[in-house]
């Protein structure tokens, strides 16, 4: 069984045909795949070997799973751009899995400019030094740095790093060669508004993923107990705007992949809070203790 994340799915035909040429009987898993938390059920149950590409291992997948992480090569122009933005002489370094192999080169560049570079990890969920995941920022915390350089694309991970560490984060985009400081204020204002709306909800759906690697049942049950009489645990495979519209709850708490609550917020028909946000809505946690949702 060959399993590729959405961004690599179009390479599936070429990879599958190349494996067939080597004598393997290959099935390509056509379902969406979001991370190594989401190993192909079909592959685990029916294939001799599951080849899971694009992600690093998350714990023990067993010896029938072959992980093929993706490494992207890029220049370090974005880091050159970031150096003048640093205020101190110590910087933590983090990256997504695709760019983590570039961090030793980033560290050398910083040291040559008189800046101490700190790399945390590996951690249980992030096997590469300096690696962060959308659900795990332990490597960033381990640096203990007040300023952190994030190497990667997109806005979610650098926002997660700043929310998880409270450090000043400079996002270096290796594709565009640019660097900019991350400002979490807009995101936090939007999240605050969602929390306020959820306080008024007469019904709350606690989303429990049926994907084994994203299933956090004790957490879902604990959260439902916080709003007894209003909350119902919902077992769900795909958390989509359409699915939530059909369920018709006034608000939801997401215990599946932490990114879902943030990434699709504008498209959901009702507030979808993260577990720490729901704790704020129910009065268990104060706004000052706002935390990004992490797994493990
Ligand atoms: S839970 Fe989400 S962020 Fe974490 S590995 Fe799975 S898909 Fe990625």
Image (cartoon, rainbow, N blue to C red):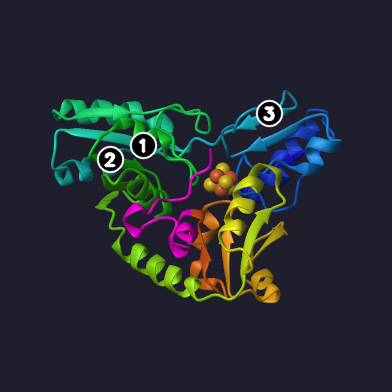
Q: Earlier in the sequence, mark 1 or mark 2?
A: 1
Question: Residue 174 location, x and y as percent?
Answer: 35, 44
The image quadrant of residue 48 is: top right
Question: Residue 129 location, x and y as percent?
Answer: 42, 27
In the picture of the structure, the residue carrying the numbered disc 2 is 148
Q: Is residue 295 magenta?
A: yes
The image quadrant of residue 15 is: top right
In the picture of the structure, the residue carrying the numbered disc 1 is 140
* Mark 2, other Cα within 10 Å: few <14 / some 14–19 / many ≥20: many
Could you tell whether 9 is left or right of 251 in the image? right
Give the alpha-carbon distance from disc 3 to disc 1, as whole Å. 27 Å
Establish if 140 lies above or below 114.
Answer: below
**CB under 8 Å between discs 3 and 2:** no
Q: Residue furthest top?
A: 63
Q: In the image, what residue occupies the spot 33% across and 28% down?
A: 119
Could you tell whether 84 is left or right of 171 in the image? left
Question: Residue 17 location, x and y as percent?
Answer: 76, 39
> Which contiguous range is marked in magenta?
276-296
Q: Nearer the viewer, residue 20 or 125?
A: 125
Residue 6 appears in the figure: no
Give the alpha-carbon distance from disc 3 to disc 2, as whole Å. 32 Å
Residue 223 appears in the figure: yes
In the picture of the structure, the residue carrying the numbered disc 3 is 66
Q: Look at the numbered disc 3 and say if its residue's Cβ is closer than 8 Å to ligand 1.
A: no
Q: In the image, what residue occupies the spot 17% across and 42% down?
A: 86
Establish if 148 lies above or below 154.
Answer: above
Mark 1 element type? helix
Q: In the image, what residue occupies the spot 45% across and 26% down?
A: 122
């Amino acid at each position: 069984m060959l399993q590729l994340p959405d961004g690599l799915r179009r390479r599936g035909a070429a990879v599958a045909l190349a494996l067939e040429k080597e004598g393997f009987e290959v099935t390509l898993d056509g379902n969406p795949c979001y991370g190594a938390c989401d190993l192909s059920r079909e592959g685990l149950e029916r294939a001799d070997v599951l080849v899971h590409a694009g992600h690093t291992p998350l714990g023990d997948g067993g010896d029938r799973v072959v992980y093929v992480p993706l490494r992207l090569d890029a220049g370090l122009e974005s880091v050159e751009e970031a150096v003048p933005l640093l205020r101190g002489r110590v910087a933590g370094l983090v990256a997504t899995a695709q760019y983590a192999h570039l961090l030793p080169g980033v560290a050398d560049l910083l040291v040559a400019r008189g800046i101490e570079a700190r790399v945390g990890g590996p951690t249980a969920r992030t096997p590469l030094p300096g690696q962060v995941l959308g659900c795990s920022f332990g490597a960033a915390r381990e640096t203990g740095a007040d300023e952190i350089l994030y190497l990667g694309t997109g806005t979610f991970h650098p926002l997660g790093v700043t929310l998880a560490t409270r450090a000043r984060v400079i996002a270096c985009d290796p594709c565009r060669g640019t660097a900019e400081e991350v400002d979490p204020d807009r995101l936090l204002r939007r999240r605050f508004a969602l929390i306020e709306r959820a306080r008024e909800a007469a019904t709350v759906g606690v989303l429990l993923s049926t994907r084994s690697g994203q299933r956090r049942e004790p957490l879902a049950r604990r959260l439902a107990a916080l709003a007894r009489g209003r909350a119902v645990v919902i077992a769900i495979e795909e958390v989509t705007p359409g699915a939530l519209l059909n369920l018709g709850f006034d608000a939801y708490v997401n215990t599946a992949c932490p990114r879902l609550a943030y990434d699709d917020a504008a498209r959901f028909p009702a507030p979808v809070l993260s577990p720490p946000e729901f704790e704020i809505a129910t009065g268990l946690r104060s706004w000052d203790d706002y935390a990004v949702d992490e797994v493990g």
